[in-house]
Amino acid sequence: RQHIWSYAVGIHNIAQSYISQCPCSSGGSGTASPPSFVGGDYYCDTGNPNTNWELIVYPDRLWDSSGVSCVSGSTCCDNPDQPWFRKKLTTPSTDNIEVRWCGDQTRSDEAIATRNVELYIQTEI
């Protein structure tokens, strides 16, 4: 398997150290680093403007270069192409592409609402 891209969700972006914040947030030293196989190939965002969290669907759309993650000191919104990404694979591949939704808790506690997923692949000529 070869990692292509990850979209991650942080618990909030308030300036305090918390392990479940986005690595790109302004939250301080307690934020988690992405796994080594992810490297810098990810976007992370949060829709939660509060210091705590509730089991609700927050109205802020994620990975759109705006919202509560786009604050001073945060690098979460530095790429204006979000939610789109471009990645050139180092070698050609005919492997299947997998799309996964992952969490470290049950769906009843950590569900992610997804409206649609679009995938465009360009091959070199």
Image (spheres, grey):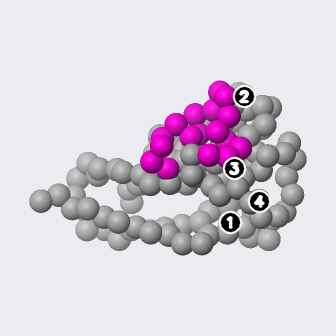
Residues at marks 4 and 2, CA–CA distance in whole angstroms: 23 Å
Residues at marks 1 and 2, CA–CA distance in whole angstroms: 25 Å
Residue identifier under label 2: 28
Residues at marks 3 and 1, CA–CA distance in whole angstroms: 11 Å
Amino acid under disc 2: Gly
- Is residue 93 left or right of 37 when viewed as pictured? left
Magenta: predominant secondary structure element?
loop
Amino acid under disc 4: Tyr
**Disc 4 and disc 3 in contact, CB within 8 angstroms:** yes
User: Which element is circle 1 on?
Assistant: loop
Tell me where residue 100 appears, x and y as whole percent.
Answer: 54, 67
Looking at the rendered image, the quarter that the N terminus falls into is bottom left
Local crowd at mark 4 within 10 Å, few (<14), some, or many (≥20)?
some
Q: Which residue is depicted at the point 78% across and 37% down? A: 14
Q: Earlier in the sequence, mark 1 or mark 2?
A: 2
Residues at marks 2 and 3, CA–CA distance in whole angstroms: 16 Å
- Is residue 43 left or right of 74 when viewed as pictured? left
**Disc 3 and disc 1 in contact, CB within 8 angstroms:** no
Local crowd at mark 2 within 10 Å, few (<14), some, or many (≥20)?
some
Residue identifier under label 4: 58
Can you say whether 98 is above or below 14 in the image?
below
Local crowd at mark 3 within 10 Å, few (<14), some, or many (≥20)?
many
Q: Earlier in the sequence, mark 3 or mark 1?
A: 3
Tell me where residue 99 appears, x and y as whole percent.
Answer: 49, 67
Instruction: Tell me which segment is drawn in magenta.
Output: 66-82
The tag on residue 46 is 3
Q: Residue furthest left?
A: 125
